[in-house]
Image (cartoon, rainbow, N blue to C red):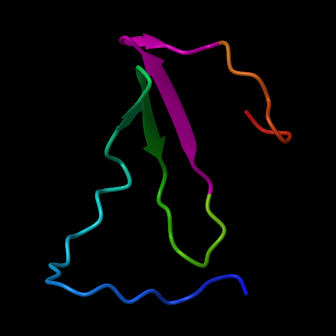
Amino acid sequence: MLGDEIIVGGPHTDEPLPSSDAPVTADGYEQHLFGDLTAGEATSFQIHFTRDGDEVTNLRPYLGSY
C-alpha cells in the first residue's frame, strides 16, 4: 500500500498554500522558483539559490540534474 487515510480528531481550519514564487529558506540558503507550475502538465522552471545574499554557484549534479 502506498498510502493510507489518517483521521485525526479536533478542530481544523483550512489554510491556503503559499505562493509557488515565495522564497523558501533552509540552513542559510534561500531558494526562488521561477516558472508557471501546473499540476498534471509538463512544465519548465528554474530554481535560483542564494546564501547570505550571495548567489550560490558551486552546485553539483545529483541524479543527472543540478
Asked if residue 39 lies left or right of residue 60, the reply is left
Q: Residue at x 28, y 58 (%)?
A: 18
Residue at x-position 47% and y-position 59%: 36
The count of marks equals: 0
Residue 65: which quarter of the image? top right
**Location of residue 12 in the rendering, given as x and y in whole percent from the top left corner:** 17, 81
Residue 49 is one of the magenta-drawn residues:
yes
**Depth order, front residue of 8/15:** 8
Image spot of residue 23 (x, y percent): 34, 39
Q: Is residue 61 above or below residue 55?
A: below
Q: Magenta stretch?
A: 44-57
40 within the magenta span: no
Give the left or right position of residue 31, taking residue 14 as reference.
right
Q: Where does the N terminus fall, quadrant-wise? A: bottom right
Residue in the picture at 37% in, 11% down: 52
Quadrant where the image shows the C terminus: top right
Against 30, is 5 above or below?
Answer: below
- The residue sitting at the right extreme is 64
In the displayed structure image, the side of residue 7 where residue 65 appears, left or right? right
